[in-house]
Structures are given as C-alpha cells and as structure tokens.
Image (cartoon, rainbow, N blue to C red):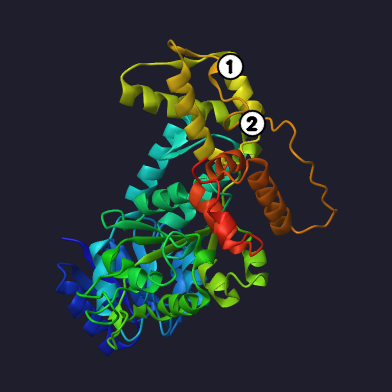
Amino acid sequence: MPHALVVDDEADSAEMMAALIAAEGFTVATAGSLRDARKQLALQEPDIVLLDLMLPDGSGMQLFDDGKLLANTEVVLITGHASLETSIQALRLGAADYLVKPLNMKQLHGILSRVTKPATLRAEADSLQSSLEQEGHFGLLWGKSAGMRRVYEQILRVSGTAVTVFVTGESGSGKEVVARTVHDLSRRRAKPFLAVNCGAISPHLIESEIFGHEKGSFTGADRQHQGFFERASGGTLFLDEITEMPLDLQVKLLRVLETGTFMRVGSTQLLETDVRMIAATNRNPMEAVQQGKLREDLLYRLNVFPIHLPPLRDRQDDIPLIAEHFLDEISRREGQVKHFAPQALLRLQSYRWPGNVRELRNIVHRAYVMAPDTTIVDECLPTTETPLPVMTGAPVLQVRVGTPLSEIERQVTLATLEYFGRHKEKTAATLGVSLKTLYNRLKEYSTVPEKQAGQGDDN
C-alpha cells in the first residue's frame, strides 16, 4: 500500500487532507513542523510528500537541503495561491506539482493517481540515454548533435514536473514530437495526449473546440460537445501555432492557466481542469507580441520552461542518421530494404533544409520510390522540378541590412509564389513548409487578394 506524508502546521487542514488521501488507498502520516517531518521520513520512506513551505520552524524548502531525505519520494508543494512564481519555485525545487488551498479535489485525485517513484523516472531516463548513445535516438527524437543533447536534457528536467512548457522552432523541426516526448516521460503518460493546431481550426469554431459547448448555444449546436480541455483530462494538451489563436480566446486561455477552471460555450457553470499545458510556435515569441499575434501576459504564463528546437541546417551531422531512420521505417512498411549510396547522403547533408525534418522525411520517401533497385543514388534525389530545387531564372531579392525577418519571409514567400505561377503546392514544397502553413501566411499577407489567392491551385 502506498504511503503519504502531509507536512502542514495547520492541524485541521492536515487531518482533512490525510482523510482524503487515505480514502484513495494510501497510508498517511502527518507532521506539523520540519522536525516532525524529518522524524516521519526517517521512520518510513513515503511515496509522496505534500509539503507546506511555511512551517513554524523554517521553510519546507529546507527538507530539500539533504538530498538523500527526499531522493526517492515525489514531492508536491502546498501553497496559498497559484501563480507563475509558484510554478517556477516548484520547478527549481524539483517538486512534481503543487496544490492550492483551499484544496482542489480533482487536482488532488489526479496527483495521487499519478504517483511515481523518482527512481522509476530516473531508470527510464537512463534507458533513453543508453538508446541515444547506442542507436542515436532519444525516444521519438533522432540526433546526437550538441543542440539536440541540450533539448534532451531540458526534456528530462521538465517532464517529471507539472509546469507549462513552451516549445519554439521552425516549421517541420519536430515541436510536436518534443511535446509528445515530454508527455511520455511524465507522470501523465497513461492519460491522453491531445495535439491541437490552432492555425488549422476556423476562428469561429476554435473556442468551441477547445472549451466545448452546450446544446443550443449556437446555430448547429444540436448536442453537448466536450472540448479539448475535457477530453485531455489528466493528460497533456499541446497547443501548436499558439500565435494563430484569436486574441480574445487567448484571454480565456490565460484565465484557465491562472485558475484551473473554464466554461463551455453557452454555459455559466465553471468546470475544473486537470491538464498539463504545452504550447508551441514557429515564430519568434517577442516578435509575435510586437505584431499583436500573442498577448504578452499569455507569453509569460506559457513560457515557464522554454525549449528551443534547432533547425536541421544547424545540426547537419544528424542528417544521415535521421535519413537512415526514415528509410528503415519505409523499408519495413513497404517490404523491401533499400540503402543510401554515400554520395546521396553527402548531397542530403549539403542542402539547407528550409522545411527541416518534415521536408527530409518527404524527400527520403520520394527517393525510396524513385530508386530502381536497392540503392538510392544521387540521381534518385529531387531535381529542379521538385524540392531540393535550384531555381534558375528566379528574380533576385535585395534586402537591406536590418530588415525584420518577418518582412524578409513575406517577400520571399510572395516572390516564390509568383515565380511558380501562383502554384501553391510547388511554392510550399520549395519553401519547405506545409500547404496549410502557406495558406496561413497568405491569409496573413493582406497584399494577396482573395480572388488571386485561388488561382493556380489546379496547375
């Protein structure tokens, strides 16, 4: 039977918490001071400690001073209010989560249902590190470069906590895979992982999709609908392209992060949520704030633990490893094993990969199909007709030093679109972005009229 220790100098609060925890199948001890807590820890190592930081003989943080005392115990802080500072403090101390007084029963139940010994998490981390050295991958992420090793260290640091993570990186660099890896290494792994692309949902429907709606709340709402916050309960909600979320909805998202509650569209009833939030963007977050795409207060609330994913061009040594991995996947699926000729791998390494890992996967798949036998040679890789292009005859863009990157991106996107006769699939492939991302950009660039935007699609 798992054992819990409640460290709280308010006797009534401690007893009430102990009773609730006992009802969940735990044995429970209580302590009203640091001195009592140390005695209880010496008597029996608990699986979980619920720790009030304000104690009569000092701060609860002092229990962390002796590394062995809580070495194999999950720690949950008890605080009087939820705040950004509390999240950061919990992360700094190595606490798994925090509870806010008065007690949130749903949150407490969720924490108790996810109790995992730190030793178990460390064993999984060691296994991943071993796979990295032997096979070149860290879970679903591939690469052994210094930049990726920093990402892996950050994932290990944050996955065992409940703090919000903000992943940045270019389109196609693998931000969703990072979010999935954080979830898979967390105590929430047995619960859902839901990935939501905020740029792919109509602005008119996104609030209903995220928060849900009541029957009859708007035309067409013929039944009650559970949103992503309810469907991801106990698990992780990944909000990709967060800067594409309407600003009025960003206000409501901020409220959820601060209070842990939300309302369905058309309802006045507050619902509690128990979800770990991970957000991502392919934009520079501060530029997005300056451009009015992201609320500054939401950025600071999301950016508790930032992870930046390097573009593929900055880790060229990883390209052969990733390409071979994709080729192995395709070979197993198609039933015929193929391999790269050395010259073909060298060519892949020499390319700049504006579409990052997503573009590399597509190129490897095409090369597999193009190879007439079991060897993928240089000639199997794309030419000027497809990605990896050399755009002969393309106009030269002249850019002044100091031009904002967003403006350079706009000019290059529109110039490439015109070069390909407004053929959007060729434009997206050349720029190394998805067709959806291209449409999002064109919608943003008011210089592209609606009628022209539809031309060339069937070319």
Marks 1, 2: nearer the viewer: 2
Q: On the picture, is 269 further left or further right than 422?
A: left
In the picture of the structure, the residue carrying the numbered disc 2 is 389
The span from disc 1 to disc 2 (Cα, nearest Å) is 14 Å
Q: Earlier in the sequence, mark 1 or mark 2?
A: 1
Foreground residue among 186 and 212: 212
Q: On the picture, is 244 further left or further right than 37?
A: right
Circle 2: residue type: Pro
Circle 1: residue type: Asp
Foreground residue among 146 and 296: 296
> Residue 161 is drawn in which quadrant?
bottom left
**Which label was assigned to residue 96?**
none
Q: Position of residue 435 (x, y in %)?
A: 50, 48
Q: Position of residue 370 (x, y in %)?
A: 47, 19
In the picture of the structure, the residue carrying the numbered disc 1 is 378
Q: For the residue labelled by badge 1, is the local secondary structure a helix, a strand or a loop?
A: helix
Q: Say few, some or many: other residues with alpha carbon within 10 Å of mark 2 (under 14 / 14 to 19 / 20 or more).
A: some
Foreground residue among 60 and 252: 252
| Residue at figure coordinates x 57%, y 77% from the top left | 297
